[in-house]
């Protein structure tokens, strides 16, 4: 196996070396139809083809975690596994790599793919609540969870009835979470989301403009885009300050950080952290905040 490390990924990321496609195909034979030599003569897939990416994801989840049943319905977001895994590992560092179901995590916008709870439950044994505003996506996520016994008892998927709220209607009275996580909608409009998809395809050398990586409106865009979404989340988080140890979200655009940090100071967050992430040339970051002092973040 070629053990070349992928630049920027977390050291505990199980996907931080080049894929061993023969082993992956042995584990998940359906992947074979999408594997062929790239320009350098190495086995690879066409990352601009969502069916190929889905087949790769299925093989990775099956080989690495024994998750034999994972799929997404047509038109929904197909997530890259290494980057999603990185977020989970950085969150584990935030809580000193604590393990087990006593660690409770809330995933805002879990999606039909339910990928963060699947990885977090498999890697660390954490228990998850996955909140989702799309009823069809929620049904699909529940189907995935139920089909994988190793995580079925650790993941609870709940419907968020309001498209403008993150925590209201999900966090119940007396309920406590060690962490919240979120991959927020990036774009501010459907047109911007479509252009972003086409740009991604061009960067990957995609020739068929009809293909894309999927994603429904609530997955890709919302009023105010990423900045507006996270600012609303920050305001709402203050209401649940005593029920969550750490609130976190991905932030794709670094230029948003000053205004987000200003919003956090306005709601009197006690601690603010920015955790840089990278996957090759792609840069991102996690914004984390807490209203509690360290000794109060994890009540007994």
Image: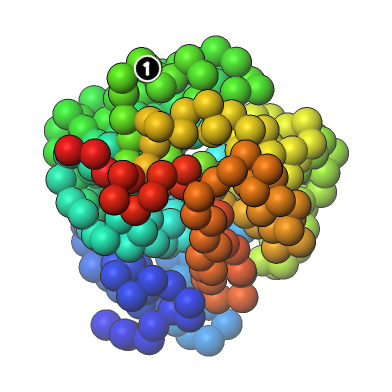
- The answer to whether residue 29 is seen in the rendering is no
Please provide percent x and percent y for residue 249: 54, 47
At horizontal 31% and vertical 30% (from top left) the residue drawn is 176
At horizontal 55% and vertical 13% (from top left) the residue drawn is 161
- The answer to whether residue 87 is seen in the rendering is yes
Please, is residue 212 above or below residue 96 in the view? above
Circle 1 crowding by C-alpha within 10 Å: few under 14, some 14–19, many from 20: few
Q: Nearer the viewer, residue 143 or 237?
A: 237
At horizontal 17% and vertical 38% (from top left) the residue drawn is 300
Residue furthest right in the image: 191
Please, is residue 75 above or below residue 271 in the view? above
Q: What residue is pinned by disc 1?
A: 172
- 15 on left or right of 273: left
- 154 on left or right of 88: left
Name the image quarter holding the N terminus. Answer: bottom left
Q: Nearer the viewer, residue 155 or 166?
A: 166
């Amino acid at each position: 196996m070629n053990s070349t490390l992928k630049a920027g990924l977390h050291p505990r990321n199980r996907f931080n070396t080049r894929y061993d496609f023969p082993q992956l195909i042995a584990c998940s034979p359906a992947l074979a139809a999408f594997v062929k030599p790239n320009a350098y003569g190495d086995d690879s897939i066409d990352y601009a083809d969502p069916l190929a990416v889905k087949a790769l994801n299925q093989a990775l989840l099956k080989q690495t975690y024994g998750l034999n049943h994972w799929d997404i319905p047509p038109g929904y977001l197909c997530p890259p596994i290494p980057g999603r895994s990185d977020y989970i590992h950085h969150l584990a560092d935030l809580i000193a790599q604590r393990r087990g179901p006593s660690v409770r995590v809330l995933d805002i916008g879990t999606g039909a793919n339910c990928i963060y709870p699947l990885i977090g439950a498999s890697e660390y044994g954490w228990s998850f609540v996955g909140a989702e505003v799309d009823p069809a996506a929620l049904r699909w996520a529940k189907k995935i969870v139920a089909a994988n016994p190793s995580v079925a008892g650790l993941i609870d998927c709940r419907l968020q009835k309001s498209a403008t709220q993150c925590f209201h209607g999900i966090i119940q009275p007396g309920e406590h979470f060690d962490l919240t996580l979120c991959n927020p909608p990036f774009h501010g409009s459907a047109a911007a989301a479509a252009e972003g998809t086409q740009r991604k395809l061009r960067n990957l050398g995609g020739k068929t403009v009809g293909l894309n990586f999927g994603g429904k409106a609530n997955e890709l865009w919302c009023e105010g885009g990423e900045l507006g979404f996270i600012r609303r989340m920050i305001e709402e988080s203050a209401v649940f300050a005593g029920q969550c140890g750490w609130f976190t979200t991905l932030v794709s655009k670094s230029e948003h950080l000053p205004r987000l940090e200003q919003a956090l100071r306005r709601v009197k967050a006690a601690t603010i952290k920015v955790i840089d992430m990278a996957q090759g040339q792609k840069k991102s970051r996690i914004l984390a905040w807490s209203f509690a002092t360290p000794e109060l973040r994890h009540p007994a």
